[in-house]
């Protein structure tokens, strides 16, 4: 018997909350759930999951620890071009794109703090 709702959030250190908020809102239309002091929580539309960001300008961003990447699933493969354009406009760096299989597109990009984000359809 599963007694949880599953994964609800990821918490990550970032250099600049304002920049991070603009970046994720521009690409994924995320909404602010909570923002106070050095903490920002963004919610993905239509879901109960969240990304939590803690600002630390002194943090040594030599790598992203053991986080390989985190992902967002598209509702339609036709939306990939729109997301790709949003990533570029928001300042993301595309690291990989293509298809897992015919008709199943994928896109990987780096956010302003170097975290790798995947967008895919399946």
Image (spheres, rainbow, N blue to C red):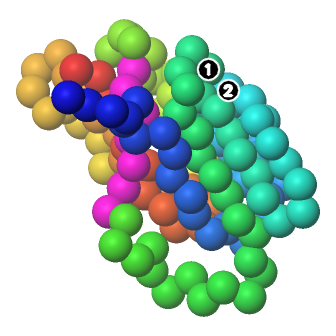
Q: Is residue 69 inside the magenta stretch?
A: yes
Q: Nearer the viewer, mark 1 or mark 2?
A: 1
Residue bearing mark 2: 29
Magenta region, residue range? 68-74
- Looking at the image, residue 28 lies above or below residue 61: above
Quarter where residue 65 is shown? bottom left
Badge 2, how many Cα within 10 Å: few under 14, some, many 20+? Answer: some
Q: Say which quadrant the N terminus sits in.
A: top left
Q: 83 or 20: which is nearer to us? A: 20
User: What residue appears at the point 24 percent right and 36 percent down from the top-left corner?
Assistant: 98
Along the polypeptide, which appears first: circle 1 or circle 2?
2
Image height of 18 relative to 55, above or below: above
* Residue 120: image location, x then y, percent: 32, 30
Q: Residue furthest right?
A: 37
Tell me, yes or no, if residue 19 can be seen here: no
Q: Height in image: 49 above or below 80?
A: below
To which residue does mark 1 refer? 45
The C terminus sits in image quarter: top left
Task: Say whether marks 1 and 2 touch (CB < 8 Å).
Answer: yes
Pick whichever, 10 or 29, lies toward us: 10
Residue 7 lies, with reference to residue 17, above or below; the image says: above
Left or right: where 95 falls relative to 56:
left
Q: Secondary structure at mark 1?
A: loop
């Amino acid at each position: 018997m599963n007694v949880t709702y599953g994964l609800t959030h990821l918490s990550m250190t970032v250099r600049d909350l304002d920049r991070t908020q603009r970046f994720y809102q521009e690409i994924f239309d995320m909404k602010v759930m909570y923002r106070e002091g050095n903490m920002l929580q963004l919610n993905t539309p239509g879901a109960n999951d969240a990304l939590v960001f803690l600002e630390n300008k002194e943090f040594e961003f030599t790598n992203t620890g053991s986080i390989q990447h985190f992902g967002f699933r598209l509702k339609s493969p036709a939306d990939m071009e729109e997301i790709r354009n949003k990533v570029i406009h928001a300042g993301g760096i595309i690291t990989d794109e293509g298809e897992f299989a015919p008709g199943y597109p994928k896109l990987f990009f780096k956010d302003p703090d170097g975290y790798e984000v995947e967008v895919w359809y399946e």
